[in-house]
């Protein structure tokens, strides 16, 4: 009888260990699936983000080659290649941060930035595509009072590039794209609300969409 009780207790302990192991495996599987989903979603989005500065680098390199005897033009194109290259490098560093990708989290790095510089870099990165479709691009910052802000330059660039890229894509050759930036009042001292509005005269979309 004593042996039977010991065997029963040992069997209960084994069953408990098996149950815990099963739970740990299920948790690990869920975590692995979530990490793989996060990686896939991230890389799908990033492939779109990387394409824009790559197109700019290729476009300005081609222009520099065709104006190789014009030092001023080549210098200007190289400067624009550098801007697009810096943005591309930031995106690549983002891709290499695998721990952040697996967790599906975005790390915001706020640094002092000059809003006109952000918009000039944006213009530079999309300029080759704008020129290719002979589109017009207008940027209006007249409603901005404080041009120096703390922001995550990479994230802001990503958002603006995605929206403006769509505007270019769905606007016909010779069409027009406007970027409006306005500073709104804010209840918090030392803060302002900034509104970025992108408008185009392309195909548009229905209210339902």
Image (tube, rainbow, N blue to C red):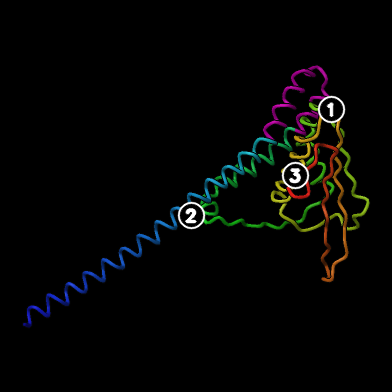
* Residue 12 position in % (x across, y down): 20, 74
Q: CA distance from mark 3 to mark 1?
A: 19 Å
Q: For residue 78: magenta?
A: yes
Q: Distance from label 2 to label 3 (Cα)?
A: 28 Å
Residue at which label 1 appears: 134
Q: Which label is found at residue 34?
A: 2
The residue drawn where x is 77% and y is 18% is 66
Q: Residue at x 89, y 40 (%)?
A: 138
Q: Quadrant of residue 110?
A: bottom right
Looking at the image, residue 33 lies above or below residue 51:
below
Residue at 66%, 39% (x, y): give it: 88
Precedes in sequence: disc 3 or disc 1: 1
Residue that mark 3 sits on: 163
Residue 168 location (% of width, % of height): 78, 36
- Describe residue 24's horizontal placement relative to residue 13 as left or right: right
Per the image, label 3 sits on a secondary structure element best described as helix
* Magenta span of residues: 53-80
* Lower position in the chain sequence, tag 2 or tag 3: 2
Residue 135: where, in percent of width, then height? 84, 31
* Disc 1 + disc 2, Cβ < 8 Å: no
């Amino acid at each position: 009888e004593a042996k039977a009780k010991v065997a029963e207790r040992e069997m209960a302990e084994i069953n408990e260990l098996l149950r815990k192991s099963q739970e740990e495996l299920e948790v690990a599987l869920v975590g692995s699936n979530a990490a793989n989903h996060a990686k896939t979603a991230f890389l799908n989005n990033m492939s779109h983000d990387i394409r824009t500065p790559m197109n700019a680098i290729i476009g300005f390199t081609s222009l520099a080659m065709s104006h190789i005897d014009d030092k001023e033009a080549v210098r200007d194109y190289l400067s624009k290649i550098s801007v697009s290259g810096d943005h591309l490098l930031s995106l690549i560093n983002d891709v290499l941060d695998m721990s952040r990708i697996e967790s599906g989290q975005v790390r915001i790095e706020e640094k002092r930035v000059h809003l006109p510089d952000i918009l000039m870099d944006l213009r530079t990165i999309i300029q080759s595509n704008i020129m290719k479709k002979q589109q017009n691009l207008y940027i209006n910052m007249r409603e901005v009072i404080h041009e120096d802000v703390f922001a995550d330059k990479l994230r802001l660039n990503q958002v603006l590039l995605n929206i403006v890229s769509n505007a270019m894509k769905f606007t016909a050759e010779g069409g027009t794209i406007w970027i409006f930036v306005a500073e709104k009042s804010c209840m918090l001292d030392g803060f302002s609300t900034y509104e970025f509005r992108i408008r185009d005269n392309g195909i548009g979309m229905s209210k339902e969409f």
